[in-house]
Amino acid sequence: MNWEPLGFIGLIPLFVALEGASYRRVFWCAWLFGLVTNIGGFPWITELLIRFGNLHWGLALVLHLLLGSFQALMFPVAALGATWLRRARVPFLPAWIAGFLLTDYVFPMIFPWYLAMSQHRFTVFIQVADLVGVVGVTSLVVAINAALYLGLMAWADRSPGRPAWLPRDLFDRRELVWSAAAVGAATVATLVYGFVLRERYHEIRARADKVPFGLVQPDIGIRQKRDPAFSSDNLDVLQRMTAEAEARGALVAVWPEASFPYALPHDPPPEGRLLRDRREGDSMRIRRGFSIPLVFGSITRGTNPPRRYNSSFVLDGEGLLHGPVDKNVLLMFGEYIPLRDQLGFLDRWFPRAGSLAAGSRPELLPLGSLTLGILNCYEDILPRYVGRLMRAGPPNVLVNITNDAWFGDSAEPYQHLALAVFRSVEQRREMVRAVNTGVSAHVAATGELLWQSSIFVPALHVAEVVPYAGRTVYSIVGDWPGYGVLVAIVAWAAWRRLRRPRYPVDRGAADRPPGRPA
């Protein structure tokens, strides 16, 4: 994840394996590639199921393999799409770009991720996300892989030690030239744009007024967090750290997801009034020892209908609670079980899974003159959801509250952060993240990490946050340009198929892409 150059060559072994392959071989080779990628990239899933799903290690391993097998299908979808396009005489480069666009736009993922995440620290490269989004950055990563593969095949075709399996003149020389020129020009333009925009936002940030946010990372373990006997102690930790943040100059504090240890009412009070914090001296009072406003998460209980929600609030300076804003996108098997009512045995398999209800729409929370866009847990890795949130406002600051303690001492908190930074670039908003056990962070509007914590240690940081206004090109048009590119390439393929002369059918040749000899 932190070896950016590998992102530009990682697909080349897949391209080599699929050259000249039948549809069946394309499927199985791409699926195996995807399985190794997903199992190797997310090894923490097995431990998650054992430790917090209360599953036997054998069942946990089987479920991890099933999940990896399903998510691996993203690669056969891309590969089969690209192979079909190539057999319609669409050149290699646009065929594979379209294949991955198809995957990114239509394939459902339980744990969504993008090839672009490999470049999250290459901030000059990812600035173009404010035009084309993370999927557009992924397309450029795919294009660079494809261009390097074409160059490698051209070199191998002319080398003295040419592999016997490599067909001669596999790619047309004109295709090689225009592919190299197109990818080279796109890469140079991306880097120039990225350098100019990044420097511009550095200058804006240096001159802008800032609001100090106190980010509280209490490092409360899952078992202690869920045990009611520790509720008072857990709240005391949060309050003391918030008082320290105020002493350091914070004007607002942020607590992690579901950090308030007592359930709050979800239904609004009568006559449009706001909920009020409990009285001084009450053990369940939210504000104790500090006076600044607070953004925090809490489980809420509704009565009509009787449901539980994962919600967020702002406690203002007058002790009034603004909210709740409910988590819209729930984690499957963590916060809800699909088909729970129809398949009762799933409750026995996942005894600790939640039964939460999802929010109906993205909502914003007011904080004085600011508007906050709350991203609860992994909502910060979902570009389309954040796009809906921006259309609801737009907010001045993105606030992510998360509890990644479930995943243990693993790569997951860092992978989560790597995916989240793209939301700041796409929307040109600074993001503050308060994560129970880390990684908490302050992300600039350029995607640069201005501060990040370690995991499984208490941490407190006062982040000087710049509130932004306005919307980016990507915020306005979303993924429609990508849809247009995909439709155009498929239409091109259909047109070329219709224009193809009708020759006698050679069934062996029908299963080979152009260039593969009989």
Image (spheres, rainbow, N blue to C red):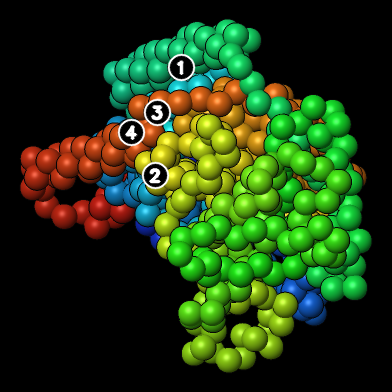
Q: Which residue is mark 1?
A: 190
Residue under the point 89% across and 55% down: 236
Decide if residue 116 is on the left or right side of residue 514: right
Choose mark 3 or mark 2, whichever is in front.
Answer: 2
Instruction: Identify which amino acid the numbered label 3 is placed on.
Output: Arg
Whichever of callouts 3 and 2 sits on the residue coming sooner in the sequence is 2
Q: Neighbour class for label 2 at 10 Å: few (<14), some, many (≥20)?
A: some
Q: Neighbour class for label 4 at 10 Å: few (<14), some, many (≥20)?
A: some
In what quadrant of the picture does the N terminus appear?
A: top right
Decide if residue 88 is on the left or right side of residue 502: right
Q: Which residue is mark 2?
A: 392
Q: Are marks 4 and 3 in contact (CB under 8 Å)?
A: yes
Say which of 397 and 379 sits in front: 397
Whichever of callouts 1 and 3 sits on the residue coming sooner in the sequence is 1
Residue under the point 79% across and 77% down: 54
Report the Cα–Cα distance between label 4 and label 3.
7 Å
Determine whether the residue tagged by mark 1 lies in a helix, strand or loop: helix
> Is residue 475 among the parts visible in the rendering?
yes
Report the Cα–Cα distance between label 4 and label 1.
20 Å
Residue 476 bears which disc, if any?
A: 4
Residue 427 bears which disc, if any?
A: none
Instruction: Identify which amino acid the numbered label 4 is placed on.
Output: Ile
Q: Which residue is mark 3?
A: 471
